[in-house]
Image (cartoon, rainbow, N blue to C red):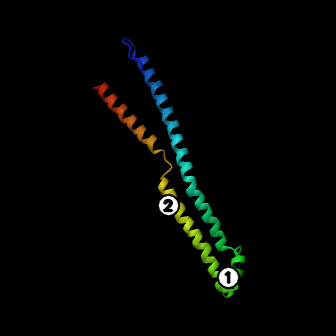
Amino acid sequence: MTEEPGRTAGQLVDDLTSDTAELVRAEIRRGQQEVLAKAREASRGAAMLGGAAVLGALAAGTSAAFVVRTLGKVLPAPSAALLATALYGGGAAALAVAGTAELRRVGPPLPEETLASVRQDVRAARSGAAGAAG
């Protein structure tokens, strides 16, 4: 905004509107970039949870027949099936814990830096408006 003597109130309001719109657009772009960065960072934890789901399905299904048959050579068949299920279930639990920890480390997907910047802008605008009114 330029400081020129003799500018009308209408011109000043137009400048303020233009500056505010530009600031809002810049903050929206910044928020989008921050959300995308968080999504990229969270993808690792989400992938771990996906792996946990696959291993969990193996634990619940009969696709572990090879392991059951191999263990069945050393153990009775029911014990072999139980051990195979426990192994796959343990792997799924470990990946679920690791994936959840990764997602907690990343935090919520909100654009926190942008929100803080908008709060500062609002405080500055309020204090500027209060100073101009007083």
Nearer to me, 19 or 133:
19
Nearer to me, 133 or 118:
118
Residue 121 pos. (x, y %)? 40, 34
* Mark 2 surroundings: few (<14), some (14-19) or many (≥20) residues within 10 A: few
Image point (41%, 19%), residue name:
12
Q: Is residue 93 left or right of residue 62?
A: left
Residue 127 pos. (x, y %)? 32, 32
User: Residue 89 occupies which quadrant of the picture?
Assistant: bottom right
Image point (69%, 75%), residue name:
64
Image point (46%, 40%), residue name:
114
Residue 103 pos. (x, y %)? 51, 57
Q: Which residue lies under the disc numbered 2?
A: 101
Image point (63%, 77%), residue name:
85
User: Residue 1 occupies which quadrant of the picture?
Assistant: top left
Residue sticking out furthest to the top = 6
Establish if 35 lies above or below 130.
below
Label 2 amino acid? Ala
Q: Secondary structure at mark 2?
A: helix
Q: Is residue 120 left or right of residue 82?
A: left
Q: Which residue lies under the disc numbered 1?
A: 71
Establish if 7 lies above or below 28.
above
Label 1 amino acid? Leu
User: Residue 15 occupies which quadrant of the picture?
Assistant: top left
Locate the C terminus by quadrant. Answer: top left
Q: Secondary structure at mark 1?
A: helix
- Of badges 1 and 2, nearer the viewer stands 1
Which one is earlier in the sequence, the residue at label 1 or at label 2?
A: 1
Nearer to me, 133 or 120:
120
Residue sticking out furthest to the left = 134
